[in-house]
Amino acid sequence: MQQEQTQQSLPREIAPRAWIEDIKPQIDSGAFPIKRTRGENVRVRASVFADGHDDVKALLCYCTPVGEWHETPMARRANDVWEAEFSVEQTGTFLYTIKAWIDNFSTWQGEIQKKFAAGQQVTSELLEGAAMIEEAAQRAETPDREWLSTLSIKLRSGESQADLVALATADDTCGIIGRYPDRSNETVAGVSLAVTVEPERAGFGAWYEIFPRSVTGSPEKSGTFADLENKIPEIVHLGFDVLYLPPIHPIGRTNRKGRNNQLLATEEDPGSPWAIGSEKGGHKSVHPDLGTLEDFDHLLAAARAQGLELALDIAFQCSPDHPYVREHPEWFRHRPDGTIKFAENPPKKYEDIYPLNFDCKEWRTLWQELKSIVIFWIDRGVRIFRVDNPHTKPLRFWKWLISEVRREHPDTVFLAEAFTRPKVKYALAKVGFSQSYTYFTWRNTKQQLTEYMQELVNTEVREYFRPNFFANTPDILSEYLQFGGRPAFMTRLVLAATLSACYGIYSGFELLENEALPGSEEYLNSEKFEIKPRDWGKPGNLHAFIAKVNTIRRTNPALAANRGLAFYPVDNEQLLFYGKRTENFSNILLVAVNLDPHHVQDGWLQVPLEALGIDENEIFQVHELIGDSRYLWQGRNNYVRLDPESCPAQIFRVRRRLRTEHDFDYFM
Amino acid sequence: MQQEQTQQSLPREIAPRAWIEDIKPQIDSGAFPIKRTRGENVRVRASVFADGHDDVKALLCYCTPVGEWHETPMARRANDVWEAEFSVEQTGTFLYTIKAWIDNFSTWQGEIQKKFAAGQQVTSELLEGAAMIEEAAQRAETPDREWLSTLSIKLRSGESQADLVALATADDTCGIIGRYPDRSNETVAGVSLAVTVEPERAGFGAWYEIFPRSVTGSPEKSGTFADLENKIPEIVHLGFDVLYLPPIHPIGRTNRKGRNNQLLATEEDPGSPWAIGSEKGGHKSVHPDLGTLEDFDHLLAAARAQGLELALDIAFQCSPDHPYVREHPEWFRHRPDGTIKFAENPPKKYEDIYPLNFDCKEWRTLWQELKSIVIFWIDRGVRIFRVDNPHTKPLRFWKWLISEVRREHPDTVFLAEAFTRPKVKYALAKVGFSQSYTYFTWRNTKQQLTEYMQELVNTEVREYFRPNFFANTPDILSEYLQFGGRPAFMTRLVLAATLSACYGIYSGFELLENEALPGSEEYLNSEKFEIKPRDWGKPGNLHAFIAKVNTIRRTNPALAANRGLAFYPVDNEQLLFYGKRTENFSNILLVAVNLDPHHVQDGWLQVPLEALGIDENEIFQVHELIGDSRYLWQGRNNYVRLDPESCPAQIFRVRRRLRTEHDFDYFM
């Protein structure tokens, strides 16, 4: 009886011997894809080994979005780790997995060499090898088939063992037989892991946020899409890639908020753009004061023609006047007294906003309608969305929505405005958001910035979470900006623009706007509740500085990614010193920033010579890109002095010296 | 058309909102179980959270080997990490997973408290709460049902809001309603993770290896099971728990190795016990010179009666004379000339051994037969097996064999003699081996020992890999022992016995045997190839020292596990200073070892006062257990001087001072 049981317990087929473990990158056991942008590489590592002393071979297998599988050999590193990479040249979902097998022929080659070198007879071994070569010949194509057959006959010829061993282990033999391995004993890793490949803009871009209604000469008169269109050349001149507009939809009347978030609006108050919906329409309409849908189309086309991509706001919530409230009361939460619940975060109340109930009985129609909003704007040409408060909606809704949209439109980019706990922020990235707002605005000291960047760049987080470092937002005027004056704005701009491949500012930053509601990080007279005309040419503005920094970003590919970031020592706690480089070292930048907006700071930078492949005695040129100065440096320690009043940061491009036969100095 | 597609793409059911991530411990995405011994705890951690601001609850669910599921609430730690533990009181396989849900009632409690505190009207909120309490009443049993119904009516009564809010959030209310949560929106983690629970001996034990044939007065006459039985009281006196015997089966004649591994044996040479099988039988027979199966049974019973467990060797290989070779030639590899391949690791040859071909066509009959060998000895009472060279047999064979055996006999312990690459060693542990040989013999310096222990104790490895620190084996006489004299033996014994909960010595160690084949780590005149009578009472022997160390192990539970190990600073590179403690601090040991067998070394130990909960100013007693001396220490820095000639190590038990009203000193 027991014997019968165990008889049944044998595996149906004998499992292959090669073992594959610990494939990386891999997020949560493969539950979520990693992310790349088009043209990037995916470097895959895994532990591959087998029992005994036999040779193992491993292949990285990957599948393109159109379902084509490719294989590339993996290289063996220390401690049974194998590595290979592939590049992703289309948007969509790639898959990857690993195959491995015991290579009996190369095992045999290694053994026969050792035996022969030890003076042992290898007659029988040669016959074993001949048999394996015959099998390979069966798998081979002409002319390799004949070549292998001839080799096999030769090994059986009884000629000099020295010659035959040399022949059997020659490079030619390895090369030809290597094309026809016996993979009948192949192990395939149990999982196929996924890579979401997004457009370049998902990973690299400078964002500029502006309220279209404020592009006007008077607080009484709303700016229009046409007014904004006229301003685009200025924004382009500043070097921005993405122009993000807060919601452009009709704004509700009921419970409209007044200036500075007052409970009661006057007749003149325009209301918060996030209180979406009125009798003029909802999420698929535009505010009549801004213009028409056709005006919007015109703006979008004009921006794109000048290299500027429009980003729209997705705020899945409604003003009490939104058509959904009448047409679909079932999508909202109702109180015992029959009224609809407005948004709240007790004791705070948002009386002008009704949240949607994503878990309502009619969730199917709600979810489809919300998807149709995104598709509506995609159909008008929008490709980038900034999603408002995604952390207050179910993660699984976003997972569904984003994968749905991406299936048909893989070039869509989603930025999560997720100011929430770290795990939730990361979970939103896992379920599909391309980018996310971060804690950057609250990281000001050397230790804070260093630790935060380590988490973002040197942990598994980097595989799925792309930070977008906004230096300010309509909701966040940080204390550092409030009290640090012009130097603070310059410092934060350089940090945002060089630490993170994606960064942004909200308009007014370039004009050093820094008046806050007392005791808060809210702007005084916040643009969320009023039209705010600006003097764009205000003295002291940062236009030239911003344009310079954005030009440096565009011309130095090291700044287009976060992976090459490293921090280096400097003997002053107020100075931050870090570098970014491309993978192939073709572009190497070193950045020194004075974090103290009030005082000149100086110190000795410790240049990481080994990491840059520079000799102690070598003289190398650094080109300071903001001020366009060049310095010759030598050795590890080099001095900087940063005066916040002139410029609190320096960005050095490292140029290696080339010596010629004439001993002239060139720098590449 | 597109609309239809997306319509279909909606999930069938709305997914619950709670999110469960990163459950630990978890090996390779749950592909392998973690390990515990009976009576230990499994502490489980996971990230649990949800979108929004709602309260989350989490349960740890675990299943005993007989299929009973239990639930225990998890406690919330920082950063959305939750934690709970369960203890495993039976051998076999336990499962664990996590469930989580949104707790709407406690969310409501928090909100109403905040709103009321902010002076807001909560009339509608009280009605919402009443509805939830009514629902809970539906789920409740008498008398809670009535209690809840009454509460619900009360909340609708319109009485003072202050009173009702206080009532709704009172401890009583929380307690009763907490028993009937609404778990309809529950998330269940997708995986059930497994724990292999083994007998205590799998995790804690002192091993002694002896060749039964050497328990004799003459090299010409084999010792017997009966001779060994007579020696058991001595081994018990030394404090060992496990008595491990190299193979006890008939030894082959063909190509038998002579003394010192010579190719040709003389008539008198007994051969290697690992060349298993002759016309007298194979793996289920005993060598006639040792006695009969009944003698073996007698030995086993006598040992067990004295508290000593027998461990047998499993070496799945055959001498050319093994019955399998005749009866099952299909289980072996054949060369082109028709002969069977002997074992080799080119250019080394093992002509007296035929390996089995685990991948042969007839693998099913072979695997079953090998399993029947293990079952044969289990049926005779053996519970511990030391497996020879498991890394030269397929990992998947071991996975099958060990799980097969464990299913019926969960009390079986397997020690892997895996001297191979780290990944293979760890993979053997993952597929089921209880314990493994290690690199301990080659880790001699402070840095080597510290780094190796960190890997074993402070990484995921500790969840599945249990080291067994053999200080020597018949194959390994380390250079340290060859040249370090008596102090080296004492040092290595203390290190093995205190760093690892499982350790062992091979007989002769206690007699300081240290003569090696020149230029190797092989014993001169190795017992593998000859009968080796010993003078067990040889002057200078370590009997008393070993007995003392083993007594310390048995009376200090801190040494029964590896988790509580930590290394502490000492200002001398030749001194190693570390501690072990039980989880509840009931047993705290500090160990100082002189790694230099040639010179006295002294230094200042830095006692980790904070970790031990001792105040800077407190005077505490340490009891040195080897020499049985007591010292009063104060503060962080305390001096030791270790003379290798007398004793190169000290093991301090830390005793905390208890003050009484009379100011007498007691030490617990």
Image (cartoon, coloured by chain):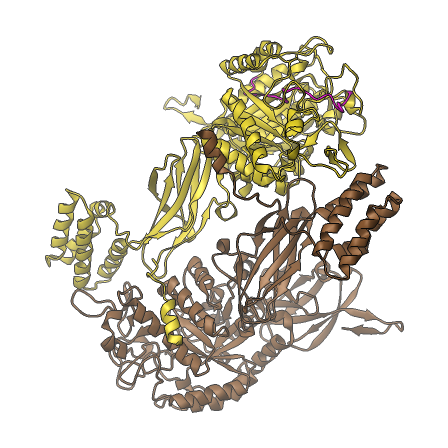
Chain colours: A brown, B yellow
Q: Total marks drawn?
A: 0
Where residue B609 appears, as percent x and y from the top left, is 51, 35
Residue A319 lies, with reference to residue A50, above or below; the image says: below
Where residue B571 appears, as percent x and y from the top left, is 65, 36
Relative depth, front residue between B40 and B450: B40
Res. A435 visible in picture: yes
Q: Is residue B243 within the magenta segment?
A: yes
Relative depth, front residue between B615 and A322: A322
Relative depth, front residue between A663 and B309: B309
Residue A618 position by quadrant: bottom right
**Left or right: A32 as drawn, with respect to A158:** left
Residue A499 lies, with reference to residue A132, above or below; the image says: below
Residue found 60% across the figure and 19% down from its top:
B285
Relative depth, front residue between A141 and B172: A141
Res. B500 visible in picture: no
Where the C terminus of chain B falls, by quadrant? top left
Residue found 55% across the figure and 34% down from its top:
B433
Write the start and end of the magenta stretch as one range: B239-258
Residue found 64% across the figure and 69% down from its top:
A558
Where the N terminus of chain B falls, by quadrant? bottom left
Where residue A638 appears, as percent x and y from the top left, is 71, 64
Q: From the image, give the main secondary structure of the stretch colored magenta.
A: loop
Where residue B563 appears, as percent x and y from the top left, is 51, 35
Residue found 69% across the figure and 71% down from its top:
A653
Residue B23 lies, with reference to residue A516, above or below; the image says: above
Q: Is residue A12 within the magenta segment?
A: no
Residue A150 lies, with reference to residue B409, above or below; the image says: below
**Left or right: B194 as drawn, with respect to A571:** left
